[in-house]
Image (cartoon, rainbow, N blue to C red):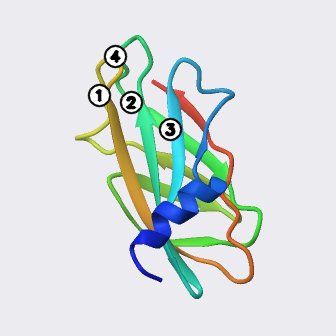
Amino acid sequence: MPASAGSRAAAAGLSRPCHHHCTPHTAGYTIVNSWQGGFQGEVKVTAGPSAITGWTVRWTFANGQTVSQTWNATISNSGAEYTARNVDYNGRLGAGASTSFGFLGSWNSTNTAPTLTCTPS
């Protein structure tokens, strides 16, 4: 799929901001690109009105998606439940500052964007 597919995917509602458990800090999920059986995801973590020294983002894939490679975060999973934690160089965020991490994943028939929860530390 061409690179512009990611912007079409985001416009189609595949980018979901985290509305609960994140206030005042947020995390948003975007499918950057997608192809038959695979996709590239990105999560943007933004600090709220105060600085944070670290963050954890959690989500559950509903359609059997899996993550095979990641950058700018440490990701672990238990089945469909995923946890991403900051790495040394992107955990400290000033008020209103943001960072992002990405990953490559696979999917079978549907690639529904998950709802994220984020916890600052």
Dots 2, 1 in contact, CB < 8 A: yes
Task: Point out residue 22 in the picture as x, y percentages from the top left corner.
Answer: 59, 26
Task: Point out residue 6 in the picture as x, y percentages from the top left corner.
Answer: 47, 66
Q: Quadrant of residue 18?
A: top right
The answer to whether residue 53 is above or below residue 109 is above
Task: Point out residue 71 in the picture as x, y percentages from the top left corner.
Answer: 34, 60
Marks 4 and 3, how far apart at CA: 17 Å
Dots 2, 3 in contact, CB < 8 A: yes
Quadrant (top left/top right/bottom left/bottom right) for the C terminus: top left
Q: What residue do we see at 64% from left, 78% from top?
A: 107
Marks 3 and 1, how far apart at CA: 12 Å
Residue matched to label 3: 56
Three-letter code, disc 4:
Ala
Residue matched to label 2: 54
| Residue 12 visible from this viewpoint | yes
Lower position in the chain sequence, tag 3 or tag 1:
3
| Outermost residue to the bottom | 36
Q: Does dot 1 land on a helix, a strand or a loop?
A: loop
Residue matched to label 4: 95
Lower position in the chain sequence, tag 2 or tag 1:
2
Dots 1, 4 in contact, CB < 8 A: no
Q: How many marks?
A: 4
Q: What residue do we see at 70% from left, 61% from top?
A: 61
Q: Does dot 4 land on a helix, a strand or a loop?
A: loop
Question: Toward the viewer: 77 or 71?
Answer: 71
